[in-house]
């Protein structure tokens, strides 16, 4: 419709990749030229796992990442089918549900980036987790298309910064 070939998108992606590679090598060269020469002491693997409280935190984060990844994958793959079969949404509306979910994940990550210096990570994670659980719990019982759209957006916002916060 716009008169552009489908190959144009490949050229744009190649350009973006080339810019990223150029920036990477420029930053790498700058780091090498400005780096002081010193030997960094490496921690042993055994030394990392001596503290029992650190181990518990590591195990908690491990399981939290597993639960998060599982629930996000289920939401991203199951939601369109569920809303199509159980709530009677047409294929476009079911696809739009998934699009809203991902859009609000991205928007929530941007907002979390802005708020990360003002709110502690644990508080932000607790708020987002509670938001996601509440939205999904209510969402599965909704029949109104507009309420489904609103709640899937809230769920996407709730899922947004959990993974980056768990990794950091």
Image (cartoon, grey):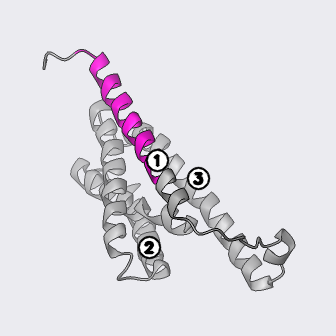
Q: Residue at x 31, y 17 (%)?
A: 7
Q: Which residue is mark 2?
A: 130
Residue 43: give x, y in percent of width and height: 78, 73
**Which part of the image, by quadrant, shows the C terminus?**
bottom right
Q: Is residue 117 above or below residue 87?
A: below
> With 107 as the anchor, is 122 left or right in this view?
right
Q: Main secondary structure of the magenta part?
A: helix
Q: Earlier in the sequence, mark 1 or mark 2?
A: 1
Name the mark nearer the viewer: 1 or 2: 1
Q: Quarter-wise, where is residue 1 in the image? A: top left
Q: Residue at x 41, y 60 (%)?
A: 160
Q: Secondary structure at mark 1?
A: helix
- The answer to whether residue 113 is visible is yes
Q: Which mark is residue 74?
A: none
Residue 73: give x, y in percent of width and height: 53, 47
Q: Nearer the viewer, residue 10 or 148?
A: 10
Q: Quarter-wise, where is residue 153 in the image? A: bottom left
Q: Which mark is residue 70?
A: 3
Which residues are the magenta region?
Answer: 5-27
> Is the C-beta separation of discs 1 and 3 under 8 Å?
no
């Amino acid at each position: 419709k716009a008169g552009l070939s489908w190959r144009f998108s490949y050229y744009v992606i190649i350009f973006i990749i080339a810019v990223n590679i150029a920036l990477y090598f420029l930053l790498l060269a700058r780091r090498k030229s400005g780096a002081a020469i010193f030997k960094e002491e490496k921690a042993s693997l055994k030394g990392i796992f001596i503290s029992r409280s650190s181990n518990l935190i590591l195990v908690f984060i491990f399981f939290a990442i597993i639960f998060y990844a599982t629930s996000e994958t289920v939401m991203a793959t199951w939601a369109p089918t569920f809303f199509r079969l159980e709530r009677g949404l047409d294929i476009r509306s079911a696809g739009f549900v998934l699009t809203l979910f991902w859009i609000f994940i991205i928007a929530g990550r941007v907002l979390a980036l802005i708020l990360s210096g003002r709110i502690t990570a644990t508080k932000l994670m607790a708020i987002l987790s509670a938001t996601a659980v509440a939205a999904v719990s209510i969402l599965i019982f909704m029949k109104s298309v507009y309420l489904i759209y609103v709640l899937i957006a809230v769920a996407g916002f709730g899922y947004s910064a959990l993974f980056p916060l768990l990794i950091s």
